[in-house]
């Protein structure tokens, strides 16, 4: 079975500071990993995904994530936070033969001036 | 850019009533999903649908739930007799193919409140 754990339900960052959102996964097979973002009153939007190609994955809006098998992690980073990054971020896992996504609990990001 | 749409955005119903949540997936997509998120909890998978039949369902998706693709564009989730615990945000998603690598595109959700 697959599962993800997101450390920190709320993260506050200053504008211009590094954004780091943590995601650890558990999977009995090589996983596919996803980061989604949800802005207020909107659906979930894909930021980036790892599907067994390059371990460093670049996404939209300046975000990137690195797949580390040894640490079973897929942490999301952005070098410099912008006010528009305030949203909820979800890590999710899937695997070959699985059609569904298993989501983490989400991390709410607040950006302060 | 094509997007998944859902109606209504909000629905309030009385316990025991039937509700139908509607979704219009992206037009050339083949695989459809329903997820839900109870307030303060994780987004949970309910059901996936492909080629006019259910591919997979979770233990949440009991006999009170059903899905249908009544025409070439709509994808619906019906809850026959709503319970208080069905109150949640319901998300529809679609993907272009059946591979687990495929991106799932989500709609904005329907917030269901059962009184």
Image (cartoon, coloured by chain):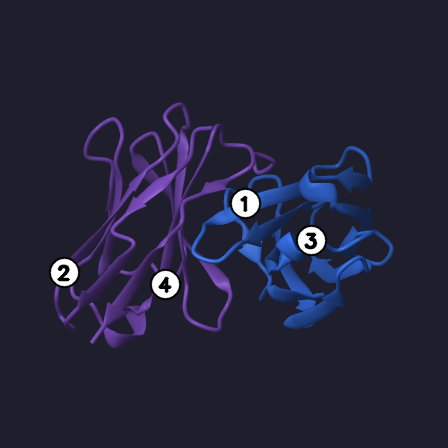
How far is the residue under mark 2 from the one under mark 3? Answer: 39 Å
Task: Tell me if B56 is positioned left or right of B15 in this view.
Answer: right
Q: Quadrant of residue A106?
A: bottom right
- Element type where label 4 sits in the image: loop
Where residue A57 appears, x then y in whole percent? 77, 39
Disc 2: which residue: B18
Task: Tell me if B39 is positioned left or right of A95 in this view.
Answer: left
How far is the residue under mark 4 from the one under mark 3? Answer: 23 Å
Disc 3: which residue: A28
Instruction: Indicate the chain coloured blue by its letter.
Output: A
Which dot, 2 or 4, sits closer to the camera?
2
User: In the depicted view, which residue is nearer to us: A38 or B82?
Assistant: A38
- Specify whether disc 1 shares its chain with disc 3: yes
User: In the depicted view, which residue is nearer to us: B27 or B67?
Assistant: B27
- Specify whether disc 2 shares its chain with disc 1: no
Instruction: Name the subunit of mark 3.
Output: A
Which residue corresponds to the image point at 40% horizontal and 28% vertical from the top-left? B30
Task: Tell me if A17 is positioned left or right of A42 in this view.
Answer: right
- Element type where label 1 sits in the image: strand
Q: Colour of chain B?
A: purple
User: In the depicted view, which residue is nearer to us: A1 or A79?
Assistant: A79
């Amino acid at each position: 079975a697959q599962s993800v754990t997101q450390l920190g339900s709320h993260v506050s960052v200053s504008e211009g500071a590094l954004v780091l959102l943590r995601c650890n996964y558990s999977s009995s097979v090589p996983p596919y990993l996803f980061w989604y973002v949800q802005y207020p009153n909107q659906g979930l939007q894909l930021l980036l995904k790892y599907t067994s190609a390059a371990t460093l994955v670049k996404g939209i809006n300046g975000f990137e994530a690195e797949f580390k098998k040894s640490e079973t992690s897929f942490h999301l980073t952005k070098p410099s936070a912008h006010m528009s990054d305030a949203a909820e971020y979800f890590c999710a896992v899937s695997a070959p033969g699985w059609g569904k996504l298993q989501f983490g609990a989400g991390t709410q990001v607040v950006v302060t001036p | 850019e094509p997007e998944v749409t859902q109606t209504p955005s909000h629905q309030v119903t009385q316990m025991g009533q039937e509700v139908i949540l509607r979704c219009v997936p992206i037009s050339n997509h083949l695989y459809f999903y329903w997820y839900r998120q109870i307030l303060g909890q994780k987004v949970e998978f309910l059901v996936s649908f492909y080629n006019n039949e259910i591919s997979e369902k979770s233990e949440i998706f009991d006999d009170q739930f059903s899905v249908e693709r009544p025409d070439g564009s709509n994808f619906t989730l019906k809850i026959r007799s709503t319970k208080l615990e069905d109150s949640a945000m319901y998300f529809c998603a679609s993907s272009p193919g059946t591979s687990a690598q495929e991106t799932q595109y989500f709609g904005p959700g329907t917030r269901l409140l059962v009184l």
